[in-house]
Amino acid sequence: VEINDISLVDFIAVKGKNATFVAHTAGRYQRKAFRKAQCPIVERLVCTLMRYGRNAGKKLQACRIVKHTLELINVLTDQNPVQVLIDAITNSGPREDSTRVGSAGVVRRQAVDVSPFRRVNVALYLMASGASELMAEAASEIKLFGKWSLDEVEISDISLVDFIAVKGKHANYTNHTAGRYQRKSFRKAQCPIVERLACSLMRHGRNSGKKTMACRIVKHTMEIIHILTDQNPVQVLVDAIINSGPREDSTRIGSAGVVRRQAVDVSPFRRVNQAIYLMTTGSRESSFRNIKTIAECLADEIINAARGSSNSYAIKKKDEIERVAKANR
């Protein structure tokens, strides 16, 4: 192992008496200033990973992470991973920084050279912090059932954006959040749209409460949609809901025997509710006494609705409702 920067030779402990078999020497390097310069550089990387309260003291876990890291570096670069680590520290440590100069309210920033010891310290800190941020970014992308990204789903109808919960805080790994959305009016608008589809399947007495079965059906449905369309199945579902919700309906007006039908606009919330209801009803009816499973029928229904095809039960019902409403204007 070679240290290219001669100024860092005394502060990157890697050879001679600092060579060890493992990255855990149990040395008390914190007892005196600058003593940690004698700590093996791989162990210093381990100690830097033990930051923030939840990771404090978990040195065995940090050692395991560093061991796997060095193995990956060897596989990816076909070089000595300790040499790669030293080159990274040499390149990452800033040579110049700024400090506060002055007092009594007159304070300015002054450029200063960075000592070799601090260069090594800052380089280790920056690399460990960068790894933590990359891990957080990777973990922040939530995929439904671990397969389909929810961040790329687009809701083309602006009026339904607030009532189709699919992105942001509504993103989930499964379609079972155990939320009590029925406790207050309009709260179910915050329920993830895939979970609402599962809840709508639990209709008629014999299916009531069987949410695990409904979740399994929806999962199979999503996989079938992905195979048939080669698209994100959540996007297909959102498009189907946008196409299936009737925009106009008719209601009863009048009393005392004089009753007539009057055409009215449908709210965005009811459009979403009716779209989900019509799709699940159509799939339930088509799968009854049929060799096709409920998941296959639901997948066909959602795909046809997303395309606006008249083969969809929901599209046919929507057209019928709007046609009756048009006659009652």
Image (cartoon, rainbow, N blue to C red):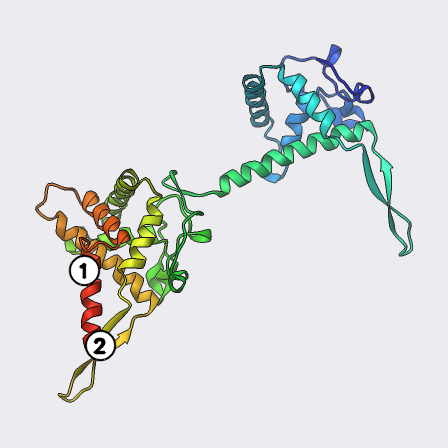
Above or below — where is 310 with respect to 186?
above
* Position of residue 171 in the picture relative to residue 210 (left or right): right
The residue depicted at 22 percent of the width and 54 percent of the height is: 309
The residue depicted at 69 percent of the width and 30 percent of the height is: 124
* Amino acid found under the numbered disc labelled 1: Lys
Q: Secondary structure at mark 1?
A: helix
Report the disc number at residue 251: 2
**Dot 2 crowding, Cα within 10 Å, few <14, some 14–19, many 20+:** few
Residue under numbered circle 1: 316
The residue depicted at 21 percent of the width and 58 percent of the height is: 314
Report the disc number at residue 32: none
- Whether residue 176 is visible here, answered yes or no, is no
* Position of residue 55 in the picture relative to residue 327 (left or right): right
Q: Position of residue 41 (x, y in %)?
A: 70, 21
3D distance between C-alphas at marks 2 and 1: 20 Å
Q: Earlier in the sequence, mark 2 or mark 1?
A: 2
Q: Position of residue 134 (x, y in %)?
A: 57, 37
- Whether residue 240 is visible here, answered yes or no, is yes
* Position of residue 169 in the picture relative to residue 185 (left or right): right
Q: Position of residue 126 (x, y in %)?
A: 68, 34
